[in-house]
Image (cartoon, rainbow, N blue to C red):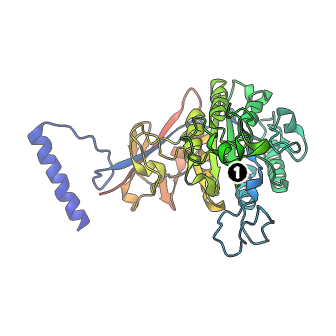
Amino acid sequence: MKQRWLSAFGAGVAALLAAGCQTYDFEPVEPLAIAQTTQSKTVIAKQLKPNLMLLVDTSGSMNFPTNTSDPICPLNCGQTTPCPAGCPTRLSELKLAMSSFLGSFQQSPVARVGMLAYPSPGGDGCNPATAAEITTAGRGVPIPASEDDAALKQVAGQVNSVIQSISATGGTPTAASLAALGTYDALQAKDREQFILLLTDGLPNCNASTTPNSCGGATGCNTLCTNSAWQPGQGCCTLTGACSGNYCAKGCLDKDLTVKAVEALATGGVRTIVVGFGADLVSGPGPDTLNALAKAGGFGRKCPNGTDAECGGGTNKCDVTKFCTMSYYQARNSDELKKALEQIGMLVGVGDPCVYSLDAVPSDPKFLAVIIDGVSVRSGPDTWKYEGGKVTFLGGLCSKLSSATPTNPVKVEFRIVEGL
């Protein structure tokens, strides 16, 4: 019935075009598409690998369970008592996902990877990480100067080893830690793309000047957490208890300074990719804050064709500005984090220029069109095949993509029917 309906619809469209002298620019997806989503990438296979610096949040809330209703996880574990073995915590899930992500880099290094964990140990838990700590054992790994794949694979393994060994404690001085990376020499290079991958589970805080008002006790202090991050009185205290005493200001949400730090990095040519990890970022001021960071960082998730499918569907919609309502990458567990990191890896690095994961999956391979430099290319043994959400280019077309250079790039587009 669907094929018959489509044929009738196509005939109707043809009649309307003849009668009304109007042009409807449908792409060559067969059968006829009345709505579609587009994923595109300009391939430059032979270019300098980008620098990718991981800024990893190791604040105390990373000890919380990823799912507080999990029967394996006792009430308030990670706060008053450690969570038992078998209870997935934000930190354990992060380690699991990063092992997979960095494992792929060890197989095919698409970027020069380094890392830095924050906050810095000691003090009141609000010490930001510093650029000097990148060379400190157990805290960071420098971005390698080499372009050699063997060296890059080795460094990716070192980064993974450090991440697997980290523990979580303290606050979330995101703004000052980002600012510190702005002074890191390796991120000043102009001959390649520069990225910071911010992995955070908590809202930024630790800014002693968040509110100019004096503290008025637990209740009054929480009310004074009123920078432009959220409406006054709407829960700008980021702590599980009250923002009081020494943490009256430092416990307040620090959106403003953090956005400024990301903007300063972008001005210097460093884009910030934001991954929000954990239940704190599902509702309240969390999404608002991380959306602002993602957009300021120049890597907010966009939907250029105005379709929800480009944002992953579900509750993440395409708004009127053609940004996804959730412009950052959200991950509530290791599986979601793995998926987000896989998408980011494809966007940051060239990777295998002949294999692409699709953002939206067609309900039928017939609903997929592949466009190379503006020309529709049908699937075949010397062109491409689709399987399991991935398009693999073959033969001569794979060779063309693998040979792409900055002066001779190849534009690849995937156009998928969204609905009939």
x, y (%) of residue 156?
78, 47
Residue drawn at x 76%, y 51% is 106
Residue drawn at x 84%, y 48% is 158
How many numbered dots are placed on residues in this image?
A: 1
Foreground residue among 304 and 229: 229
x, y (%) of residue 93?
71, 61
Residue drawn at x 72%, y 32% is 209
SS at badge 1: loop
Foreground residue among 294 and 348: 294
Q: Taking the image as drawn, is residue 117 in sight?
A: no
Q: Taking the image as drawn, is residue 259 in sight?
A: yes
x, y (%) of residue 23?
20, 37
Foreground residue among 180 and 188: 180
What type is the residue that disc 1 sits on?
Ala
Q: On the rendered structure, is 401 left or right of 310?
A: right
Q: On the rendered structure, is 25 left or right of 171?
A: left
Q: Quadrant of residue 265?
A: top right
Location of the C terminus by quadrant is bottom left
Q: Quadrant of residue 99?
A: bottom right
Where is mark 1, residue-wise? Answer: 242
Is residue 232 positioned above or below 74 on the image? above
Location of the N terminus by quadrant is bottom left
